Amino acid sequence: MIITIASGKGGTGKTTVAVNMALSMENVQLLDCDVEEPNSHILLQPKITETELVCTKVPLISEELCNYCGKCSKFCAYNALFVAPKTVMVFPELCHSCGGCALVCPKKAITEGERRIGVIKKGEAEGVEIVYGELNVGEAMAVPLIRAVKSQMKKDKNVIIDAPPGTACSLVASVHKTDYCILVTEPTPFGLHDLKITVQVLKDLGVPMGVVINRAGLGDRKVYEYCKKEGIPILMEIPFSKKIAELYSRGVPFVAEMPEWKEKFLEVRDKIKRGEADG
Amino acid sequence: MVKEITVLSGKGGTGKTSVTASLAVLAQKAVLTDCDVDAPDLHLLLKPEVLEKQEFKASRVAVMDKELCVQCGKCEEHCRFGAIENLIIDPVLCEGCGVCVYICPVAAIELEKRVSGYAFISKTKYGPMSHALLNPGEENSGKLVSLVRKNAKKVAEKENCTLIINDGPPGIGCPVIASVGGADVGLIVVEPTLSGIHDMERALGLLNHFKIPSLVCVNKYDLNEDNTAQIAEFCRSNDVKIVGKIPFDSVVTEAMVAGKPIVEYSPESMVSKAIEELWKHTLENL
């Protein structure tokens, strides 16, 4: 079973839910797909056993073979190639690695080289296997690194994916081909607004979903009304509590100090497994 | 010269938008932008009246004519994005590269332009606003951010505004790079948690990478004073100024529920006083 934890709005508690849920279950692999700002490892403190470089493919031009016909730059949808009368300029940071330029080159002057965009790290803590990505600072494209993190998925494990905030391509790449999505929100106007957009993405993708309300007690009741109207089940409420906030600030997963919550996370898992939580 | 401040954080939910909305009130007639185009929230506080709406067409999507398809499977074999499965194109995964169109032997696939979102130019009672909404699940958020900032500069010139305040998205990737590139200063809003500190360090790294001067504001600083001290130490040793420290107060959430910037909702609160100080020190460093 693959469960993704997402939110739309940042800072609603995705990582808190992902890590505490992982610690409540057995045989878990946690994939942190927030490669721009990964935080799961801060709560888990894993022992890192492996680090792998992640590269994307970029065109390499053989000036010997190239006749500057310009077909590659004409083809490139991302303006990553510019052909002048006697030179070809490549802008690797714009390249999406589609391989089109090499295909269209009539002189076979284009091969593919590699460009480093980040690393993935693998480790283990408290019986939880973790894989997370770290995008190089200054690198724009997160999606290839998210795919690299997900390629480490082990089918025989209970997989939990910690998704990045936002509702754009990084979310889609993270939630793609998962069995269920838990949306973590807070009961505020910002939380509700971004929840609505995220629900739309998941509907488009056909992924069943439920909501965890974090910092319950703050804000207003509009998130509850919205979920009821849309038929999206509320799986759990985590109260707004100084103790939980304080534990988080020190990087301590709250189930470690409040073990009674493990049962509640397992109930959520069971509901999802039995198909009783599909919104 | 128009000056530009971008508010960012690395980690989401540290209070970028609540701070930006209040700075908008204090700045009086700055152009405000929301550069978080896929989960924008600033409009919930500034209540813009839209004057102009633009279609944002930055990408294309492959569309297959089933009648012409001879099921050779070449498109599926060559697609690097896994967007074609059993000869069906998934528009969500398609990045519009055109390889399938090129490789198809019977010209059964075409690229169509798609509307990826909308950009808006609006007015608010605090000043003009440039914002946008990316369609759910879309890519090209960076390009839409660039359009929002371009629109803001045009409006600033037209309306004789000397300042633009950008509310940035979380993270450090494509839309954040598009939000900070060429700005005069990046104001990082950090919360005193270990995650907040980790993410602030990466956001500072990003600003350094693009040679943009950085300032730091600690939000909810009293939630963990040890961590706040650690932030202060980190900033001191890296020569970054802390221009504000805002206390935790649930009045911030109340203001959000009321749909108002906190300095307007509760001008006498400690939070509002702290944001006024923050604004003063930010201007001194601009």
Image (cartoon, coloured by chain):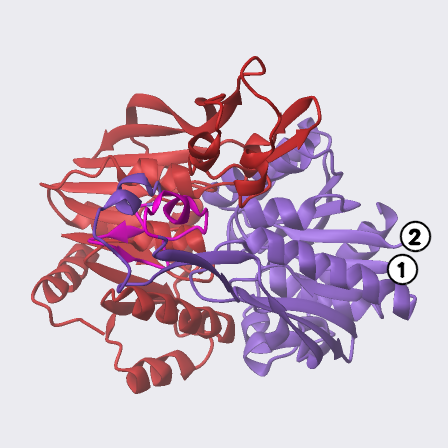
Q: What's under tag 2, amino acid-wise?
A: Met
In this rendering, is residue A216 above or below A87?
below
Dot 1 corresponds to which residue? B162
Q: Does residue A254 sit above or below B158 in this rendering?
A: above
- Tell me the residue at 42%/55% (across/down): A245
Crowd around label 1: few <14 · some 14–19 · many ≥20 (10 Å): some
Disc 1 and disc 2 on one polypeptide chain: yes
Q: Which residue is mark 2?
A: B1
Tell which subunit mark 1 falls on: B
Residues marked 1 and 2 touching at CB (< 8 Å): yes
Q: Tell whether position B103 is magenta.
A: yes
Q: Which residues are magenta?
A: B82-106
Q: Is residue A78 above or below residue A178?
A: above
Rendering colour (chain A): red
Q: Give the Cα distance between marks 1 and 2.
A: 6 Å
Q: Position of residue B148 (x, y in %)?
A: 69, 61
Q: Main secondary structure of the magenta part?
A: loop
